[in-house]
Image (tube, rainbow, N blue to C red):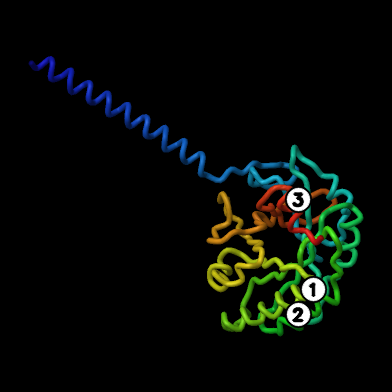
Amino acid sequence: MASRKNKSTTTRTAIMISLLVLLCILAVWLWNRKRPHFIRYAAFGIEIPANFPIHGIDVSRHQSIIDWDEVRLMQVDEIGINFAFIKATEGLNNTDKYFNRNWKNAREAAVTRGAYHFFLATKSGKAQAENFIRTVELERGDLPPVIDVEQTYGVSADKLRKNMKEFVETTEDYYGVKPIIYTNVDFYNHYLKTYFDEYPLWVAHYLQTDRPRVTRDWAFWQHSELGRVNGILNRVDFNVFNGDSTDFEKLLLP
């Protein structure tokens, strides 16, 4: 009897250990499926999220003079620079000093381009949109205009959203396309969540997650501010588009 009991106990123990091992293997497999999948590219100087086919950058005067032909020619494995958002304006009257040069040269180098406005929440949204409109002539194949909203400058959330509404409606009326809203995850969750959901979202989130931590669909993800690209002297922001080439083409101005 004792021998049988010992065998039975040993068998149950073996079964339990086997089940625990299987559960551990399953947990590891599930974690590997869900965990962020980034690949480091030494040439770009950063890790880039996998499974996104369309990559791009955004630039301003901080990148100084850019050789756009070199930007377009850079290719590592299947990663290249497919698009660039270029700072155009800020506030009521300011224009980025390299905008005209970047805007012209990016198109000549066949880099899909988009222009963005740095938004000041304390100023009239309509007047800021007019500054952008005076500066930026969009053409067929360009990305929609972008409003870059990152700070409240002390105004209330209601005032911020009112001025934003003026900007997006004015630019939409003029260009005939819905502008893209750029912000970071924290600002979105504090001030914009559930608002402006009819507009494409471009969101900054630099943690290595599988995607930005927002509760709505997004079009672009700015995943790093430390990238390197041929033809650009300084570090540059890197982005991915949330879709394939067909989706990307649909977003461009007809």
Task: Find residue 160 and report its image quarter.
Answer: bottom right
Between 218 and 106, the residue placed more toward the observer is 218
Label pair 2/3, CB-CB below 8 angstroms: no
Q: Is residue 5 left or right of residue 101?
A: left
Task: Find residue 8 and report its image quarter.
Answer: top left
Residue receiving disc 1: 89
240 above or below 92? above
Q: Nearer the viewer, mark 2 or mark 1?
A: 2
| Mark drawn on residue 128 | 2
Image quadrant holding the C terminus, namely: bottom right
Q: Amino acid at mark 3?
A: Arg
Residue receiving disc 3: 228
85 above or below 80? below
Q: CA distance from mark 2 to mark 3?
A: 31 Å
| Mark drawn on residue 75 | none
Image quadrant holding the N terminus, namely: top left
Q: Looking at the image, which residue is at 61% across and 71% down? A: 196
Q: Amino acid at mark 2?
A: Gln
Of callouts 3 and 1, the N-terminal one: 1
Of callouts 2 and 1, the N-terminal one: 1
Label pair 2/1, CB-CB below 8 angstroms: yes
Q: Amino acid at mark 1?
A: Thr
Judge the density around disc 3: few (<14), some (14-19), many (≥20) Cα neighbours within 10 Å: many
Q: Looking at the image, which residue is at 24% across and 26% down? A: 13
What kind of element bears circle 3? Answer: loop
What kind of element bears circle 2? Answer: helix
Task: Find residue 85 and report its image quarter.
Answer: bottom right
14 above or below 59? above
Q: Looking at the image, which residue is at 78% across and 49% down? A: 81
Q: Nearer the viewer, mark 2 or mark 3?
A: 2
- Give the mark count: 3
Q: Is residue 33 left or right of residue 22?
A: right
